[in-house]
Image (cartoon, helix red, strand yellow):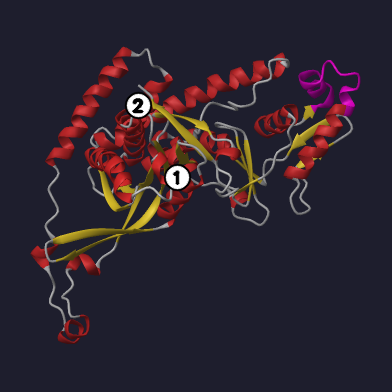
């Protein structure tokens, strides 16, 4: 799905209204004014995409102040600083009218609307999946203005239209992916989250889940790397001293979810405590965590002390890896807190993205090596947490498609995490 030239040029702007309101310049978040009315004004002008009378904007947002036109001028000055990039004139103000020119701005809602205006047969499934990922939540879910009834009436109307648009995309995807139940399942769950009382849909999802499990069981196992080891030149063998297998020579690129889990024991705070005592307390918790991760479909890539790094999505049978990783993290936290009677804390970081996977075999032993931004980002996020919490990046939040409840983490909880990255706390899976 094309994202428009506004994303590729210098000083490009992107406005997101499908979820929490955000503005990005060249892919980086732009600091927005604290005034909710100013942010709502910018969102409104971007979405309506046509000239608005100043009197109507004053009535919509500033009906009570003594000087509504002055309040509008002040807000427009803040909007101008955001959208007029490198001498551009996206904000057009006349004596009686105000407008935002849409050409230099990529608006997520407009991208979805343009896609769905096409003939269904011409829309690729990959385009629909990209469109589904644009829905980060409800329309302007963080910009409710109860004291501005005209704006609220407009926002409510947009919420209904956006929900219909999203439901149409999700239903089309579920129908298109009927032969690939594992791939269709997250979209079906997202659809059910929009209509939790739909018993017919819930029954269809149960059938789809059974179908996904059956398909996973029927998938052929990959042959062992030792079954087809290529000959190694004598020079290479004499140099290394070890004959590498085919697994050493190949690295696989995969879209996965990485998770870093840390178990924090109160005993870690005491330098003088015998390490054997720490081990006696932490080892059972560590083993329980390993078991939960592996039973949930994760593959351990590294472990040590009280930290575990795992990859979800390394196998073909685990297509919906983000949801599996989130649910594993939630289960680990509840299990460890119960097993330790509240004395141990769990913190975890999750990120979703492309990584390179290499499996190395030496004799009977095989280990997995994973490299990529998602590996480092998950670890940084876990280490940045100031309290026992499960945190996911915006990429993981988009990948779960509403199937796990998340709340945005305040910056004070992750002071050392990248400033341009958003993080969300996992709360509970959506039933």
Element carrying mark 1: helix
Q: Residue at x 39, y 38 (%)?
A: 346
The residue wearing badge 1 is: 269
Q: Residue 356 in the image: state x and y as whole percent.
A: 34, 59
Please tell me which residue lies in front, 352 or 419.
Answer: 419
Q: Position of residue 281 (x, y in %)?
A: 30, 40
Please identify the dominant SS of the magenta region: helix
Judging depth in this view, the residue of 164 and 27 nearest the camera is: 27
The stretch drawn in magenta includes residue 291: no
Nearer to us in this view, 209 or 419: 419
The span shown in magenta is: 53-70
State the residue position of label 2: 189
Residue 123 in view (yes/no): no
Total marks shown come to: 2
The residue that appears at 47% across and 48% down in the rendered structure is: 383
**Residue 8, quarter of picture:** bottom right
| Residue 184: quadrant of the picture | top left
For label 1, the crowd category at 10 Å Cα-Cα, with few meaning under 14, some 14 to 19 and many 20 or more, is few
Q: Can residue 201 be seen by looking at this rendering?
A: yes
Image position, residue 77 (x, y; %) = 83, 38
Left or right of residue 268: residue 139: right
Residue 67's tag is: none
**Circles 2 and 1: CB distance less than 8 Å?**
no
């Amino acid at each position: 799905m094309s994202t428009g030239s506004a994303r590729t040029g210098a000083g490009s702007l992107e406005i997101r209204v499908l979820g929490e309101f955000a503005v990005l310049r060249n892919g980086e978040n732009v600091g927005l004014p604290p005034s909710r009315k100013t942010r709502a004004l910018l969102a409104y002008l971007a979405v309506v995409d046509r000239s608005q009378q100043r009197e109507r904007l004053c009535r919509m947002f500033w009906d009570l102040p003594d000087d509504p036109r002055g309040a509008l001028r002040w807000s427009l000055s803040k909007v101008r600083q955001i959208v007029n990039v490198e001498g551009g004139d996206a904000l057009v103000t006349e004596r009686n009218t105000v407008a935002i020119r849409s050409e230099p701005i990529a608006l997520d809602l407009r991208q979805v609307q343009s896609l769905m205006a096409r003939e269904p047969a011409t829309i690729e499934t990959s385009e629909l999946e990209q469109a589904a990922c644009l829905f980060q939540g409800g329309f302007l879910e963080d910009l409710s203005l109860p004291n501005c009834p005209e704006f609220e009436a407009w926002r409510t109307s947009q919420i209904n239209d956006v929900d219909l648009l999203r439901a149409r995309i999700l239903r089309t995807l579920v129908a298109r992916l009927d032969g690939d139940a594992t791939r269709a399942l997250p979209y079906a769950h997202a659809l059910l989250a929009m209509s939790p009382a739909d018993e017919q849909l819930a029954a269809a999802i149960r059938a789809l889940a059974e179908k996904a499990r059956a398909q996973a069981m029927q998938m052929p196992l990959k042959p062992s790397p030792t079954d087809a080891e290529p000959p190694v030149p004598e020079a290479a063998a004499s140099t290394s001293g070890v004959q590498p297998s085919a697994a050493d020579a190949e690295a696989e690129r995969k879209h996965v979810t990485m998770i870093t889990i840390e178990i924090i024991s109160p005993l870690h705070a005491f330098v003088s405590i015998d390490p054997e005592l720490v081990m006696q307390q932490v080892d059972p918790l560590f083993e329980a965590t390993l078991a939960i991760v592996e039973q949930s479909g994760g593959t351990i890539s590294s472990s040590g002390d009280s930290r575990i790094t795992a990859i979800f999505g390394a196998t073909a049978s685990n297509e919906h890896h983000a949801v599996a990783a989130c649910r594993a993290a939630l289960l680990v936290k509840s299990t460890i807190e119960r097993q330790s009677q509240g004395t141990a804390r769990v913190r975890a970081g999750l990120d979703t993205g492309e990584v390179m996977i290499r499996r190395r075999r030496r004799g009977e032993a095989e280990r997995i090596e994973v490299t990529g931004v998602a590996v480092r980002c998950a670890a940084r996020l876990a280490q940045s947490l100031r309290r026992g919490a499960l945190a996911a990046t915006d990429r993981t939040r988009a990948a779960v498609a509403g199937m796990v409840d998340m709340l945005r983490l305040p910056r004070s909880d992750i002071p050392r995490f990248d400033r341009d990255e958003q993080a969300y706390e996992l709360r509970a899976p959506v039933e």
